[in-house]
Amino acid sequence: MTRSGIVAHLTRRTAPGPRGGLLGNLPDVAQGRMFELLHHMWRAHGDISCARVGTRLLYLVVHPDHIQHVLVTRRENYTKAMHRARPLIGDGLPASNGELWARQRKLLTPRFQVGALPQFAPPLRGAMERLLARWAAAAASGDELDLADEMIALTLDAILGSLLGERLDDEEARLRAAIRDAVDFVAASGQLFRVPLSWPTQRNRRFLAALAVIDEFVHRAIEAHRARPADDPDLLTFLLRHVGDGQDTPEVRRLIRDEAVSLLLGGHESTAQALTWLLYCLDLHPEARARVMTEVDTFGDALPVVADRLRFPFLAAAAQEALRLYPPFWAFPRHVVADDELGGYLVPAGATVMLCPYLTHRHPALWDQAERFQPERFLGGVAQGRARASYLPFGYGPRTCIGNHMATTEIVLATAAILRRFEVERVHHAPAAAEFTTTLRPRGGIRVKLRARQDANARST
């Protein structure tokens, strides 16, 4: 925090908020209570508030008008200079800034627009077929499964196919474990004040071991793909041909690695959590589930493909509503470059602005019966009749996640395929508690048992 920021905070020119003791609210953040802190700031102090975390100022911005200011109007003043995943993804698109970000965004965006979705169809279909086969065996044997783990397996299988154009049966379990350990490191409660990686702590050693597995996998895949034809449809071949205009320099090789890891992580973790929460919400709300089942059963037994995504309007609305209540990226920060004014308050250079879709999506002034699962509110389209920046499960503005169309398509098609074939019953009927880590996860997972629908139908006739 700059001297002017300290003075502004002491003279109460910053937004209202908890004052705390000598360390401010540092203990809350260090002990993993970031969500509890943000929730208290909003409830007690309104749509824009400020807390001191050690020597830093932390602003919480909840109202769409202020979000618009940060992510669009004055976006050059609110950067990702301190992206928490940088130790893992380096200068990949989610963490880059300035000219590098603009160049990579321009390169990658066309590969993820709606018209390009068919390129992802074969890998997604293969992943869905393998999941359904595993689930058929689990249903026959009566085995319990963890729904969150199964959705991660599905989406990782799909993104590996899209990235590499092939499957990695022998390595997938090892890679999945490494990704889990690396993501857990990024999500660790002390991430804002992480000790240097050179310190031999247990957490650092575990992360570096996971990073070595991920890097080994990516570098071997890169070398194997160098001889591929330039028109191969997989994403890694595309990166090799186009990042750095196809040059082979240490800087370009590092950037290809960073983009590949970013796609690998961004292409499965958030989608898996969204799928998990959607299936959970449909289990909790039988009326909504019945409407989804009408669409699914009308479609029939064939596995839905990308071209079928518009044939499930209520299911798509339910997916949007689940993303509203349980946005995978529940909060994300921006670094303030220069002094600014927001909502009538000074936001000094060096402060961190935290945007929290989880709270914005539950704002009672923006959403009627904000805590209720009501897919009908999305049947007219996501943006219809709503304030700008009131709905941002994939971010907002120029830095909206490039994979949003791919993710929503995968969520709808996978859910339709699953519910056509299986009844998914939770083993424990207590409400699932949200865990506010890097993504919004169900704490402890969600244990389920499966019943093949043809078996259930046969017993009822």
Image (cartoon, helix red, strand yellow):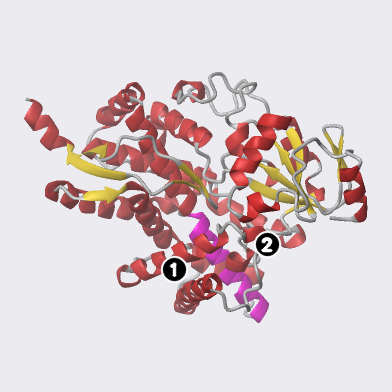
Q: Which mark is residue 408?
A: none
Q: Is residue 327 left or right of residue 353?
A: left
Residue under label 2: 193
Q: Is residue 55 left or right of residue 297?
A: right
Q: Position of residue 112 (x, y in %)?
A: 54, 50
Please state which of residues 70 and 298 is positioned toward the viewer in this rendering: 70
- Residue lying furthest front in this view? 21
At label 2, the amino acid type is Phe
Q: Residues within 10 Å of mark 1 (few under 14, many from 20)?
A: many
Establish if 326 lies above or below 251.
Answer: above
Q: Residue at x 58, y 37 (%)?
A: 358
At label 1, the amino acid type is Ala
- In the rendered structure, does residue 287 fall within the stretch colored magenta? no
Quadrant where the image shows the N terminus: bottom right
Real-space Cα separation, disc 2 to disc 1, in angstroms = 23 Å
Magenta region, residue range: 249-267
Kind of element beneath mark 2: helix
